[in-house]
Image (cartoon, helix red, strand yellow):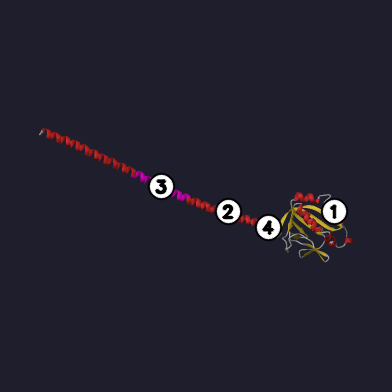
Amino acid sequence: MKKNYMFIILASTILGILVGTVLRDYNDRDIQHTYKDSLIKREIRASKKSIKNLLKEKEILQEESKDLKNNLKKVEIKEEYSKLESLKENLAYTDIRGDGVVVNIDAIDDSIGNIADIIDNNKVLINIVNDLRRNGGEHISINNERINQYSQIVLAGNHINIGSVSIAPPYKIECIGQTRQLSNYIKEENGYLNGIKQNYPLNVTTKAQENIDMGKVKMPNELKYLESE
């Protein structure tokens, strides 16, 4: 009887230990699962936060990209406008003011009479215009008529025409451009301007001048190069 009692106590003790072990293992696993769930939830929250931040960064980058495109477009428009204005200026389609030189040509005295034939036959005005361009001239006018690459200088009866506009002597050639080059040109002792005085009954005077005003061309024509007929 006593042995049976001891056996029951021993069996109960062993069973209690086994049950305790099983419960402890279950609790440990439950704790581990809870901890893992907590980690997963934390990672999910962190991922959501990262995604939200990335989306915000994406929006910022898209706005910056949009601003850059708009700014680039403005720059391109500004550059195109600048090119257009430069083209209009070069074609003499705008008024302009600047420093340069003035060349005056007239007969040496009244006995010479009308010098238009001398000027035209020897292409004097054309040669001077081309010389000025080669020596830093950017904008040129003759008797207040603007010259561009389409201008035609021709004899029309007893006077010179620039395009369809008649001009009469004396001839005043104004040129705006690189002042140092232009000043050197009009000072050349063996240059074309001195050659005119030596070879023709013409008087040529020159001077450097500031703030020359030129109006835009009145009648542009379709000729490509400056020529005489």
- Reading the image, the residue beneath label 2 is 72
Residue 214 in picture, x, y percent from top left: 73, 58
- Reading the image, the residue beneath label 1 is 195
Q: Residues within 10 Å of mark 4 (few under 14, many from 20)?
A: few
Type of amino acid under label 2 = Leu
Q: Secondary structure at mark 1?
A: helix
Answer with the quarter of the image where residue 155 lies: bottom right
Left/right placement of residue 200 relative to residue 46 reads: right
Of tags 2 and 3, which is closer to the observer?
3
- Reading the image, the residue beneath label 3 is 47
- Earlier residue among tags 2 and 3: 3
Compared to 33, does 74 lie above or below?
Answer: below
Q: CA distance from mark 2 to mark 3?
A: 36 Å
Q: CA distance from mark 4 to mark 1?
A: 34 Å
Compared to 60, does 21 lie above or below?
Answer: above
Q: Do the numbered discs 4 and 1 sit on residues whose CB atoms are within 8 Å?
A: no
Which range is magenta? 37-57
Q: CA distance from mark 1 to mark 2?
A: 54 Å
- Reading the image, the residue beneath label 4 is 87
Q: Do the numbered discs 4 and 3 sit on residues whose CB atoms are within 8 Å?
A: no
Q: CA distance from mark 4 to mark 3?
A: 58 Å
Q: Residues within 10 Å of mark 1 (few under 14, many from 20)?
A: few
Q: Secondary structure at mark 2?
A: helix
Residue drawn at (47%, 49%) of the image: 57
